[in-house]
């Protein structure tokens, strides 16, 4: 049960952390490629970063590819993580400008190379959205009558390049009542959703906006209806594998009951597709949905 509680904490962090941070090591769970961070980050000064063996050469090669980043402010931290069952030491670099663009780089201490990087562009104009992303965004408005009253306060396009392979672009949108990013706790109704460039929903967080239009009498039936609305006919390729719930005597129950008291695991028929997790709160209202990996589910006892 401890693993399940830890998994709920990880899912909560993924759902509430801004997308760029969520893709990086500020989050203790990095699902992509089954990588899990171990221990705390060690923040580095600029001098410590540049003193790392091989760093200057690696950055020069990166600057040759992206000349504009030479003027970006740089910060970073040293972390340990597990990749393919092996411990790995890396330095994560954050390159930020006053403009809309930013980068996160991963420097492999052993190979002295930048092995992957993620670039992000904020405040994406609606006119620049791919048609499939716009169509998927329009579907969201049908999930709750209150969604139409929310205002967009943040939008980000980001994509990663890992070992030379460029991944699909992803688009994240955040809405609330005020249309402004709130600091600290707020009573604003809010939702955030992430699509890839094909329009597929990767993550959907609607903790403060219960979806009342879903069909079904049970949380499981409503979760199935949610998948149908988000994925269309593709939802028929997913079946409920397991429902996980935190017991009331669990020390994490109080902190999680209002957001993710439990999860419904949907497994795809095809091994080429990823599982989907749907979270629910103490009222059995659905609060989030996200695509995940089999490794994550197995590591945290959710299967």
Image: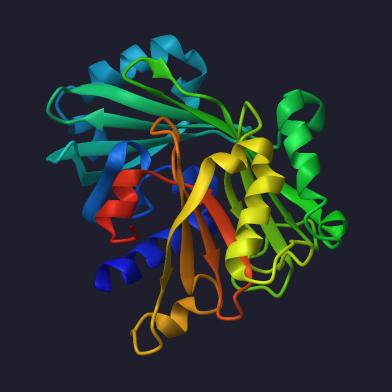
Q: Image quadrant of residue 285?
A: bottom right
Residue at 34% from the left image edge and 84% from the top image edge: 250
Name the quarter where the N terminus is drawn.
Answer: bottom left
Residue furthest to the top: 64
Q: Position of residue 215 (x, y in %)?
A: 74, 62
Residue furthest to the bottom: 249
Q: How is the image coloured?
A: rainbow
Q: Position of residue 242 (x, y in %)?
A: 41, 61
User: In this figure, what is the number of numbered marks?
Assistant: 0
| Nearest to the observer: residue 174 or residue 53 | 174
Residue at 28% from the left image edge and 23% from the top image edge: 114
Query: Does residue 173 show up?
Result: no
Q: Position of residue 154 (x, y in %)?
A: 69, 47
Residue at 28% from the left image edge and 53% from the top image edge: 298
- Vertically, is 152 above or below 95? below
Left or right of residue 137, residue 76 in this image: left
| Nearest to the observer: residue 25 or residue 142 | 142
Left or right of residue 275, residue 205 in this image: right
Name the quarter where the C terminus is drawn.
Answer: bottom left
Q: Position of residue 82 (x, y in %)?
A: 19, 43
Q: Image quadrant of residue 288?
A: bottom right
Query: Does residue 2 show up?
Result: yes
Residue at 34% from the left image edge and 26% from the top image edge: 116
- Vertically, is 126 above or below 130? below
């Amino acid at each position: 049960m401890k693993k399940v509680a830890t998994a709920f904490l990880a899912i909560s962090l993924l759902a509430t952390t801004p997308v760029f941070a969520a893709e990086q090591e500020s989050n203790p769970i990095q699902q992509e490629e089954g990588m899990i961070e171990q221990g705390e980050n060690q923040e580095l000064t600029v001098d410590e970063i540049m003193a790392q063996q091989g760093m200057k050469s690696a950055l020069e090669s990166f600057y040759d590819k992206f000349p504009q980043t030479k003027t970006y402010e740089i910060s970073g931290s040293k972390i340990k993580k597990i990749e393919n069952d092996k411990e790995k030491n890396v330095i994560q670099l954050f390159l930020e400008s006053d403009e809309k663009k930013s980068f996160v780089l991963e420097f492999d201490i052993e190979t002295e190379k930048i092995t992957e990087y993620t670039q992000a562009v904020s405040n994406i104009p609606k006119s620049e959205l791919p048609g499939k992303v716009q169509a998927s965004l329009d579907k969201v408005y049908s999930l709750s009558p209150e969604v139409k009253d929310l205002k967009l306060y943040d939008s980000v396009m980001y994509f990663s390049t890992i070992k030379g392979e460029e991944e699909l672009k992803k688009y994240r949108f955040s809405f609330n009542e005020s249309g402004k990013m709130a600091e600290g706790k707020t009573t604003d109704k809010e939702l955030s959703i992430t699509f890839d460039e094909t329009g597929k929903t990767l993550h959907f967080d609607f903790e403060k906006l219960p979806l009342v239009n879903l069909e079904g009498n049970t949380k499981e039936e409503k979760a199935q209806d949610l998948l149908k609305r988000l994925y269309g006919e593709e939802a028929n390729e997913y079946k409920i594998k397991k429902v996980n719930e935190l017991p009331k005597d669990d020390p994490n129950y109080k902190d999680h009951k209002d957001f993710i008291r439990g999860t419904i695991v949907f497994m795809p028929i095809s091994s080429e597709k990823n599982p989907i997790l749907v979270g629910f709160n103490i009222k059995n209202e659905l609060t989030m949905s996200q695509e995940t990996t089999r490794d994550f589910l197995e590591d945290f006892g959710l299967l």
